[in-house]
Amino acid sequence: QVHVVESGGGLVQSGGSLRLSCAASARALLINSMAWYRQTPGKQRELVAIKTIGGDTNYADSVLGRFTISSGTAEDTVYLQMNSLKPEDTAVYYCRADWRIGPTPYDAWGQGIQVTVSS
């Protein structure tokens, strides 16, 4: 079983920065990709940024140029550097890891971490 743990959220003023961290206890599993999502009350969870094992990245249009997803020294660790934060970035941020065992896909989610941007 893979456990995903996020850290680094909190309260920041508009224009400020935060760095989120995510670690997946992947052990011998090969992580296919790790991603950050976010969700606000009454809305669907949305993809913020994703990074594949091959190094490809993709971002939501709303965060392009402000957020950067990167890997740690281990492939099962990922960071989200968030700059020029806006009040509309306020949300619970979730980390997701996915992998395959043979042809079967699996994923695991973290418990979520609150990011609040004050105006």
Image: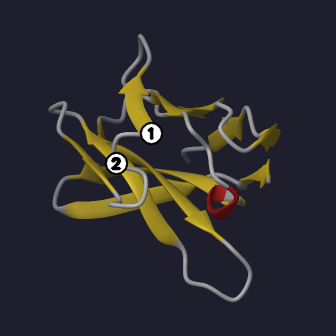
Instruction: Name the residue nearer the viewer: 67 or 5.
Output: 67
Q: Quadrant of residue 17?
A: top right
In which quadrant will I find the C terminus?
Answer: bottom right
Q: Position of residue 6 (x, y in %)?
A: 67, 39
Crowding around mark 2 (Cα neighbors within 10 Å: few <14, some 14 to 19, many 20+) is few
Residue at image position (71%, 55%) is 112
Q: Position of residue 24 (x, y in %)?
A: 54, 35
Q: What amino acid is labelled 2 in the image?
A: Leu
Residue that extends furthest to the bottom in the rendered view of this protein: 42
Residue at image position (47%, 30%) is 78
Q: Quadrant of residue 25?
A: top right
- Regarding residue 113, the answer to whether it shows in the image is yes
Instruction: Name the residue nearer the viewer: 71 or 81.
Output: 81
Q: What amino acid is labelled 1 in the image?
A: Phe
Position of 90 compared to 105: left or right?
right
How did the renderer colour the structure? Answer: secondary structure
Q: Secondary structure at mark 2?
A: loop
Position of 103 compared to 86: left or right?
left
Q: Quadrant of residue 55?
A: top left
Q: Position of residue 116 (x, y in %)?
A: 79, 52
Q: Position of residue 99 (x, y in %)?
A: 32, 49
Residue at image position (74%, 81%) is 41
Cβ atoms at labels 1 and 2 below 8 Å apart: yes
Separation (CA) of disc 1 from disc 2: 6 Å
Q: Determine which of the numbered discs, if any, sits on residue 108 in the image.
A: none
- Disc 2 designates what residue? 64
